Amino acid sequence: MTDQTRPRPKVLGGLTPYLQVDGAIKAAEFYKKAFGAEEVFAYPADEKGRTMHIHLYINGSTLMLGDAYPEHGHPHQAAQGYTLQLHLGKDDIDAWWKRAVDAGCEAVTPLQVMFWGDRWGQVKDPFGVAWAMNAPTE
């Protein structure tokens, strides 16, 4: 069990997405490669290889994730109905996009200038989570 006396990392931002994925430890490792995530806290894996909590920093914000625990009323459900959006600088978006796709994200909507004037595109990670990238053109 993790030492409960050590201070918890700071939660960044005013709203924290908390993902339930099938394979949280693998997802966290993937997010490090695809999105430059920094792992700041994690509970160790149980005997089935699951963890109840991982805390990441991505692009100046917090993302939390954990595995499903069907025996405690939390069965796995596929990701749907939401997108995590990364707000990036105009000079950064191409590098973020390339890193995500090179790591194994599927390009869903290629980067392009949208009707609102920003460059925007969407990828899906191997865990089924949709990620959008948005950057100003000016």
Image (cartoon, rainbow, N blue to C red):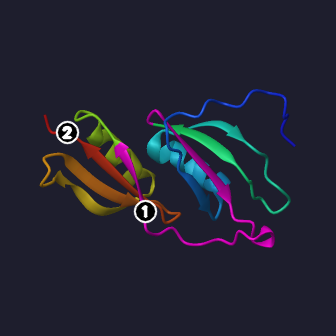
Tell me the kind of residue under disc 2.
Pro
The image quadrant of residue 41 is: top right
* Magenta span contains residue 37: no
On screen, 23 above or below 120?
Answer: below
Query: What's the CA distance linking mark 2 and mark 1?
Result: 22 Å
Q: Position of residue 79 (x, y in %)?
A: 51, 67
Residue at (85% x, 34% y) in the render: 3
Q: Position of residue 92 (x, y in %)?
A: 29, 35
Query: Observer-nearest residue: 119 or 27?
Result: 119
The dot on residue 82 is 1
Q: How many marks?
A: 2
Q: Position of residue 45 (x, y in %)?
A: 79, 52
Which residues are drawn in magenta? 59-86
Numbered badge on residue 136:
2
Residue 82 falls within the magenta-colored stretch: yes
Which one is in front in this view, the residue at disc 2 or the one at disc 1?
1
Q: How busy is the neighbourhood of tag 2: few (under 14 within 10 Å), some, or many (20 plus)?
A: some
The answer to whether residue 44 is above or below residue 47 is above
Write the residue at 74% across / 54% down: 51
Instruction: Say if 16 sits above or below 79 in the image.
Output: above
Q: Quadrant of the C terminus?
A: top left
